[in-house]
């Protein structure tokens, strides 16, 4: 998306004489993940050459990537009539219109920009549906054919968004049907979908669907270095387990308005792009989601994860710090912060933080795993084994998915010269999960 503009690819910047150094320094800083320095250098270039749309586009994207939304919108307003503007300019301006409840203007802008090009095929019909809802144009329940012509290509995420729209608009029967289609029968379900479905049935009195263990986090028991945000969670076709709702959230929908609904669409797009190996574009969609809904823990965790993938650890830590403490995902963000600190060379601060999480945690499983991982990266194998042991003690009886913890503890015992317990752990891991290649080797 960042190279996709009306006239094709962004023009190669031609900085004014004396600004070549600033341009090169900005490009280098951006490539190194230092977006704040990149902005500083490129602002100097743009000040000297204000007609250079290549620099303007880069600055807009950089401000959006770093969460400086007001500055990004300011640039968008300055360049909105340029044929060389990037498509994200119109998306940002449409979102700004939406925030000010100018739904018709937002819909018109997006249709004019993306309609003729065929771009935005996945998200534009869903966003348009939300904008129509805000204008009171949705008089009957929306169905699949209302948002896509190719029913065979529609994924479960389309049913999820239709369910959210119909739920908000008061078409509960159709919303229920679409929520269940979004769940599917795949053996797992995205955390956000499970959260919305449990919320819906809790509000509508279905005890079967709202049952579950209500654990603090929806996180499978594997090493936290391997944990990605936006994970799928177990689903047996009937009950959604291990999903914690924000206290009292069942009294109101997960999505309570047009802005929040559009934020869900952009969050989904960010998730899809990240999973498809496009982290930079994923960052922009997730930032757009957070412009619409700043308090959006699931999107914040996904964005932090994407930024970690890009090596922008300091920015990722800032995003995690913004997760509401009342959210059941708060500690998950704090655990990710542990590893961003470690990667930033602040291992002592990381250890202090994980110890604080352990002290306040109700079950401590994931916090102890994080402590073990951190100790292992610091070659403190005995301490790592102790942390893994505490994690295992907190989750009995052991299940097949716990093989990774046993394997890690066994490896730590081996590094510490404790051969007997190392062998015992590896044999137990093999017993729990006989087909794991790591254990077999």
Image: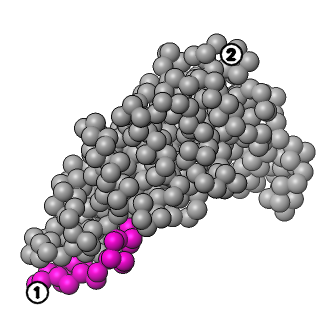
Q: Which mark is residue 206?
A: 2
Whether pointer 1 and pointer 2 mark residues with C-beta atoms closer than 8 Å, the reply is no
In this orientation, which residue lies closer to the viewer: 410 or 159? Answer: 159
**What segment is highlighted magenta in the picture?**
1-26
Location of residue 78 in the rendering, given as x and y in whole percent from the top left corner: 16, 61
- Tell me: 27 left or right of 385: left
Location of residue 441 in the rendering, given as x and y in whole percent from the top left corner: 84, 62
| C-alpha span from label 1 to label 2 | 69 Å
In this orientation, which residue lies closer to the viewer: 404 or 6? Answer: 6
Q: Against 434, is 334 above or below?
A: above
Residue that badge 1 annotates: 17
Location of residue 162 in the rendering, given as x and y in whole percent from the top left corner: 56, 38
Q: Residue at x 22, y 58 (%)?
A: 76
Q: Quadrant of the N terminus?
A: bottom left
Packing grade of label 2 (10 A; few <14, some 14-19, many >=20) is few
- Tell me: 9 left or right of 248: left
């Amino acid at each position: 998306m960042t190279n996709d503009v009306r006239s094709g690819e962004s023009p190669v910047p031609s900085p004014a004489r004396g600004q070549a150094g600033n341009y090169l320094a900005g490009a280098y800083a951006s490539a190194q993940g230092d977006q704040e320095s990149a902005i500083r250098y490129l602002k100097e270039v743009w000040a000297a050459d204000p007609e250079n749309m290549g620099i303007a586009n880069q600055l807009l994207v950089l401000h959006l990537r770093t969460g400086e939304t007001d500055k990004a919108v300011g640039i968008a307003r300055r360049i909105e009539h340029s044929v060389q503007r990037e498509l994200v300019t119109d998306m940002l301006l449409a979102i700004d219109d939406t925030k000010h409840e100018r739904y018709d203007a937002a819909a018109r802008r997006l249709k004019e920009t993306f309609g003729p090009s065929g771009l935005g095929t996945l998200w534009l019909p869903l966003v348009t549906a939300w904008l129509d809802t805000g204008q009171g144009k949705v008089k009957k329940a929306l169905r699949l054919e209302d948002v896509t012509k190719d029913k065979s290509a529609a994924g479960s995420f389309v049913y999820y968004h239709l369910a959210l729209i119909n739920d908000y608009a008061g078409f509960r029967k159709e919303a229920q049907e679409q929520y269940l289609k979004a769940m599917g029968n795949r053996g797992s379900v995205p955390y956000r979908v499970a959260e919305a479905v449990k919320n819906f049935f809790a509000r509508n009195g279905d005890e079967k669907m709202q049952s579950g263990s209500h654990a603090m986090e929806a996180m499978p028991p594997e090493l936290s270095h391997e944990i990605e945000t936006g994970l799928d969670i177990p689903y047996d076709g009937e009950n959604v387990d291990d999903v914690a709702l924000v206290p009292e959230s069942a009294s109101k929908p997960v999505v309570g308005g047009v802005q929040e609904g559009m934020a869900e669409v952009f969050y989904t797009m960010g998730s899809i792009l990240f999973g498809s190996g496009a982290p930079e574009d994923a960052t922009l969609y997730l930032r757009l989601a957070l412009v619409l809904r700043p308090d959006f823990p699931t999107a914040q965790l996904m964005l932090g994860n994407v930024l970690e993938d890009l090596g922008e650890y300091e920015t990722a830590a800032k995003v995690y710090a913004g997760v509401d403490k009342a959210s059941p995902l708060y500690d998950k963000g704090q655990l990710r912060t542990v590893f961003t600190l470690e990667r930033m060379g602040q291992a002592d601060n990381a250890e202090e933080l994980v110890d604080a999480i352990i002290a306040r945690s109700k079950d401590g499983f994931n916090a102890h795993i994080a402590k073990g991982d951190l100790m292992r990266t610091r070659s403190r194998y005995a301490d790592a084994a102790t942390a893994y042991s505490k994690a295992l003690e907190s989750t009995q009886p052991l299940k097949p998915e716990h093989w990774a913890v046993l394997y890690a503890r066994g490896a730590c015992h081996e590094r510490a010269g404790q051969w007997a317990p190392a062998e015992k752990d590896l044999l137990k891991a093999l017993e729990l999960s006989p087909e794991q290649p790591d254990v077999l080797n």
